[in-house]
Image (cartoon, rainbow, N blue to C red):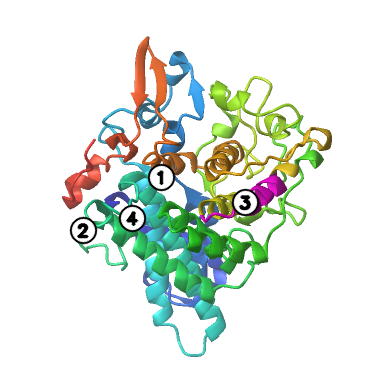
Amino acid sequence: MRTFFFIAYLLITSLLVTSCGDNFLDERPEKSLLVPTTLPELQALLDNASDVMNQGPVLNQFSDGDFTISDADLDIQPVQIRNAYLWEKQIFNQEPSSDWDLPYQQILYTNIVLEGIEKLPASEPEKLRQQLRGAALFFRAMAFYNLAQQFCAPFEQATADNLAGIPLRLTSNVTDVSVRGTVRQTYQQILRDLLTAKDLLPAKATVVTRPSAAAAQALLARVYLIMQDYNNALAYALASLENNARLLDYNTLADSLANPFPLPYISSGNPEIIFFSALNTSLNSDPAYYADSVLYDSYEEGDQRKTCFFTDQGNYKGSYTGGSFCFGGLASDELYLIKAETLARTGQIPQAMQVLNQLRRMRYAPKSFNPLSTETEAGALRAILSERRKQLIARGLRWTDLRRLNPDSRFAMKLQRTYQARALELKPGDNKYTFPIPEDEIAYSGIPQNPR
């Protein structure tokens, strides 16, 4: 976190220079560029999509067991990726981590925006002011959410008040001392930001890199699912789907292409995308990584995901970014799966399977599609969770699913790997499901380290 605090305003200066043009530079003295003070300047901070705001963490993707790599190829990977893949006790080797620093950079930007809004002149349109506030709160909630999936313990009602959460920085003052709250406080802050944001944002955004009410509702559904609040998760999944329930028919994709999915920025792009964010890794184009064999073999004959998501060798190519970086945003396919799971968990088994089959129908060749059916909650959940793993691969969600499902003996999984003839395993409930906080942050702030 400290890495960017000392250069944050220089970064903001650079952003404003590139975003506001020569007239802006002519009209304002150089010193004032350090603090954005107009609505367009504040908006420019949040629109810094490709470098800062629409980026997500990556290391959990190498820990979640969905991909494998040979020993020789692993040995030439960056040290943090290698350590995360091997579930090492230490991951960062005294180096800064973008998985920690980048979300806090996003949080700093959002806090600058939130404070700047309060200082805007009354002449600024109130509607735009409130939409900007909603966008900042959404981005801050997304950053807190991403940090929570790696750096604080999994949410459980019985322990949420006792285990350490993440530092919840709510001001732009870089001299404020970092303090870790509890896991419950972390999730309560995420919910507060999103519940406010959903009422301030437009129903749909003009561009997919900007948040909307539908995006806030989708993230609320995801967070409530993690918290085992299935009624609220269902309610917000339904609310978001009211704005966008479209599904992409995989039968229309050219699965022979290196990137079969449409680019999200074009008018005829992927209709499932509600909010665009990319994970800062090109796993999508790295031939060294192969899908786990059990996962790869779980795609049935006629399941178009097998050829749309993977090469014949099992390399991943199925990102909703339409390019080499993995998708880390929000999309309607995830909401169908949240809706199905929460229906099953609230005793509505036929409805849950109907929703699941709506999604599956758009993934199978017509002659190969057979609707799934079951009369039990356990059967429905097994089917739905299997589809989650197959559909939401390489989105950074598998790690979170493992963390939330491990306390349930029906769905807990032991991950296993072999490296240099040494058998490795990650058992359910292991402390290594919570990443260590980077050593440079511990040295600077003195906050307590996570047990490993």
Residue numbers of the magenta segment: 346-359
Residue 356 belongs to the span the image colors magenta: yes
> Circle 2 sits on which residue?
179
Mark closer to the observer (1, 3): 3
* Alpha carbon distance from label 4 to label 3: 49 Å
Q: Mark 1 touching mark 2, by CB under 8 A?
A: no
Q: Amino acid at mark 4?
A: Ile
Per the picture, the main secondary structure of the magenta-coloured stretch is: helix
- Label number found at residue 404: 1
Contact between labelled residues 3 and 1, with CB atoms less than 8 Å apart? no
Mark nearer the N terminus (1 vs 2): 2
- Asked whether residue 168 is in view, the answer is no
Label 1 – label 2 distance at C-alpha: 25 Å
Q: Camera-side residue: 219 or 303?
A: 303
The stretch drawn in magenta includes residue 436? no
Residue occupying the far bottom of the picture: 122
Q: Nearer the viewer, mark 4 or mark 3?
A: 3
Dot 3 or dot 2, earlier in sequence:
2
Report the mark closest to the observer, 1 or 4: 1
Along the viewing direction, whichever of 250 and 280 lies nearer the viewer: 250
Which of the two labelled residues, at mark 2 and mark 4, occupies the earlier sequence position?
4
- From the image, tell me which residue sits under label 4: 7
Q: Residue at x 65, y 36 (%)?
A: 318
In depth, the one of 368 and 41 nearer the eye is 368
Residue under label 3: 352
Q: Amino acid at mark 3?
A: Ala
Q: Is residue 108 above or below residue 427?
A: below
Instruction: Choose between 388 and 185: the one closer to the eye.
Output: 388
Looking at the rendered image, the disc whose residue lies closer to the viewer, 2 or 4, is 2
Query: Do the residues under discs 3 and 2 have CB atoms within 8 angstroms?
Result: no
Label 4 element class: loop
Q: Residue at x 21, y 39 (%)?
A: 451
